[in-house]
Image: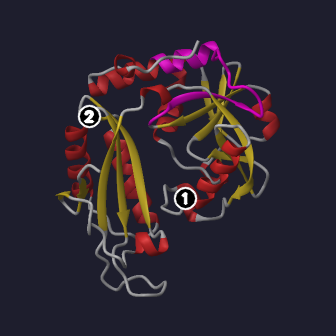
Amino acid sequence: MDEIWIDGGFVSPPGAVAANDRGLTLADGVFDTSLVLGGRVFRQEAHLDRLMAAAASLAIPADRAALELAMTALAERRGDGAIRLTLTRGPGARGLAFPADPQPTLIGTTAPLAPAMIFAPLRLQVSEIRRNETSPTARVKSLAYLDSVLANHAARQAGADEALFLNGADRVACSALANVFALAGTEIVTPPRDDGVLDGIVRGWILANAGAFGLSAVERPLTLPDLAAGQIVLTNSLRLLAPASLDGPAPVMPAPPLRALMEGLCAAIAEECGVDPRERGAVLPG
């Protein structure tokens, strides 16, 4: 295993995390995953903003300068690939009470670029597990990911690629690993955060930039019939934009507006990172 970043520097993995770290014992922490190309993180400031906000929402002390130092060091070392920053509340005594003097743990890891997953079409299956839209952890990248692990395992066992979560009100929330959009005509719709939705980085890019591609981006509740009536799109920082289908074959050809969004996102990444993901092997479907 590669060296990891923990609390300000690179160390070997053995003994890196305390046995009583609350991230390990209670899933008491948050994380962030970002795309790095040419040694630069795409939308780094947005990733740092979101991670700081997530930590604040769970009352976990966070030092933005330390997060930025780790992200920059990891990006420079990896070059092309993925970065994950994990921030826990740190070691704590047995029980649920917050430590009186929390000492958060910051861990950074990287993984090689997986260009085949970028823009790759996906098949979805609705999970029997529901997204709890009333939970604060439904709107942040919490370490409590077992629902997604189990839902995705069941989906793959059934021949799909990924699980789709509904919330307690029967509205679409997200997939196990991504935000969800429905594209119909010139309107692209994604559920609001109150429906148990993470404020995804690529989700935010679409909401801010869809108009430049002739699309109207809207946040409003979605139902399964809404997905059936249009083109389903999944978004996250490593897949970018993935056309998807529900209970059927993965789509081969994205709708023309979706392809335009894909090309625009590639251009935005190239402008910020100096590298177009297609230069590293990503292929637009169709």
Q: Which residue is under mark 2?
A: 40
Q: Residues within 10 Å of mark 1 (few under 14, many from 20)?
A: few
- Residue 88's quadrant in the figure? bottom left
At 20% from the left and 51% from the top, the residue drawn is 69
Q: Nearer the viewer, residue 259 or 120?
A: 120
Q: Is residue 148 above or below residue 134?
A: above
- Which residue appears farthest toward the right when viewing the image? 225
- Side of 234 relative to 281 (left or right): right
Classify mark 1: helix, strand or loop: loop
Instruction: Check the image and tell me how it is coloured.
Output: secondary structure
Q: Position of residue 279 (x, y in %)?
A: 34, 17
The label on residue 145 is 1
Which residue is depicted at the point 18% across and 60% down? 8
Q: Is 66 positioned to the left or the right of 181 in the image?
A: left
> What is the distance, in whole Å, between disc 2 and disc 1 at their CAs?
27 Å
For discs 2 and 1, the disc positioned in front in the rendered view: 1
| Residue type marked 2 | Arg
Q: Amino acid at mark 1?
A: Tyr
- Residue at the (64%, 37%) spot, across then down: 161
Residue 80 appears at what percent x and percent y?
30, 32
Measuring 39% from the left and 54% from the top, which residue is drawn there?
51
Element class at badge 2: strand
- Residue 216 on the magenta segment: no
Classify the position of the C terminus by image quarter: top right
Q: Which mark is residue 97?
A: none
Nearest the camera: 178 or 271?
A: 178
Q: Is residue 188 above or below residue 76?
A: above
Magenta segment boundaries in residue numbering:
238-263
Of labels 2 and 1, earlier in sequence is 2
Give whichever of 227, 45 is nearer the camera. Answer: 227
